[in-house]
Image (cartoon, rainbow, N blue to C red):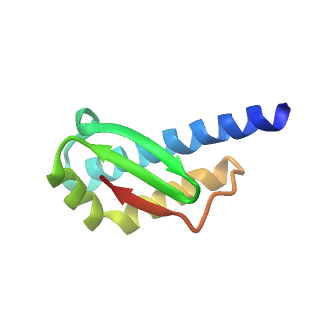
Amino acid sequence: MELNIWLEKQEVFIKSIMWNSIIDIFKSEKNIDITEYIISIQIRWKIILLKTNKPIINNEALLLDNKIKKLFSEKIKKLWIKFYDFELKYI
């Protein structure tokens, strides 16, 4: 039972950190706040799906993909969560 609770919390942490990483990178690189364009972040095995309501945001995120992944990985390591070798898809 405790393991399930930990896994659920871990998923929430991963989603939150990815959400913040994407927003931080867009603010620093493009000087725009994309918070209102992000609809959801989902995790499916080792794939993180970012859903937005603007295709142009998806294209820009694809260009910033390496920076987003790097920032996310740095933040996630600080929480001792093992989540690596993941793929980030923009839909």
Q: Quadrant of the N terminus?
A: top right
Residue 6: give x, y in percent of width and height. 75, 36
Q: Nearer the viewer, residue 37 or 76?
A: 37
Q: Residue at x 75, y 31 (%)?
A: 5
Q: Is residue 29 above or below residue 53?
A: below
- Quarter where residue 3 is shown: top right
Residue at the extreme front: 44
Q: Residue at x 64, y 55 (%)?
A: 77
Residue 75: give x, y in percent of width and height. 56, 51
Question: Horizontally, is 33 left or right of 43 in the view?
Answer: left
Q: Is residue 31 above or below residue 64?
A: above
Residue 72: give x, y in percent of width and height. 50, 55
Q: Residue at x 30, y 39 (%)?
A: 38
Question: Horizontally, is 57 left or right of 75 in the view?
Answer: left
Q: Residue at x 37, y 48 (%)?
A: 50
Q: Is residue 22 above or below residue 83?
A: above
Question: Horizontally, is 7 left or right of 36 in the view?
Answer: right
Marker count (numbered): 0
- Quarter where residue 90 is shown: bottom left
Residue 58: give x, y in percent of width and height. 24, 55
